[in-house]
Amino acid sequence: GESVGLHLPTLSVQEGDNSIINCAYSNSASDYFIWYKQESGKGPQFIIDIRSNMDKRQGQRVTVLLNKTVKHLSLQIAATQPGDSAVYFCAETYSGGYQKVTFGIGTKLQVIP
Amino acid sequence: EPEVTQTPSHQVTQMGQEVILRCVPISNHLYFYWYRQILGQKVEFLVSFYNNEISEKSEIFDDQFSVERPDGSNFTLKIRSTKLEDSAMYFCASSDSSVGELFFGEGSRLTVL
């Protein structure tokens, strides 16, 4: 059948504001979660990861929150910059899964200067 | 900074033709992967490769697909008889452990006519 492109959720944020991107994951067995950033025409780029024994992890300007009870991940970007404009994917995998990473559908972040 | 490189950046082929996509993973990495992304859709896992054999593969990775590490630096994906639905961006990735950061290449766009 013909492939139909997904309509990506879009988040528009004013430059300097904080961004929150949410994701629901599906596999209860997943114990390792990653956020990737994909700029147009490029491959996914690792941003931050978190293992299931944690509920929060902070990086430089980014924070990932994990709620295993409701299988929810979020990515918080502080002081959003124009260079943050991209599609953001959450991804899940499990130990021993040889990096069979399952990607979510992505959220397009648009930063308004 | 070390990076994963892929060639060609874009290949156009006729349906039924064989295609080989090439990747040079990061030199000290031991785990290698192929993912694909149909235009506007999710990034999908195809196959992982470690110690000269396939570790895991998805249902997409059927008998038409094969991977090989012909020498100490290259990692290839071969599609024996391309179909229209094989048109996608193919991403190679590598990592230094079975659970850890994946480093993606910029992708090879395959267009099957």
Image: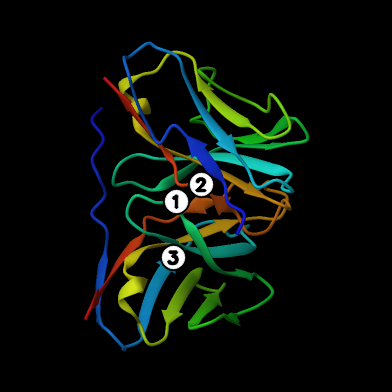
Q: Is residue A108 above or below residue A6?
A: below
Label 3, label 2: how far apart the Cα atoms are: 26 Å
Residue B11, disc: none
| Label 2 sits on residue | B105
- Identify which residue, A19 or B58, lies in the foreground: A19
Q: Quadrant of the C terminus of chain B?
A: top left
Mark 1 neighbour class, 10 Å CA radius: few under 14, some 14 to 19, many 20 or more: many
What residue appears at the point 25 percent right and 67 percent down from the top-left corner?
Answer: A10
Q: Label 2 lies in what chain?
A: B
How far across and down, in percent of the image, does residue B34 sit?
54, 38
How far across and down, in percent of the image, does residue A86 sit?
34, 64
The amino acid type found where label 2 is placed reads Gly
| Label 3 sits on residue | A24
| Label 1 sits on residue | A43
Report if the CB atoms under discs 1 and 3 are less than 8 Å apart: no
The amino acid type found where label 3 is placed reads Ala
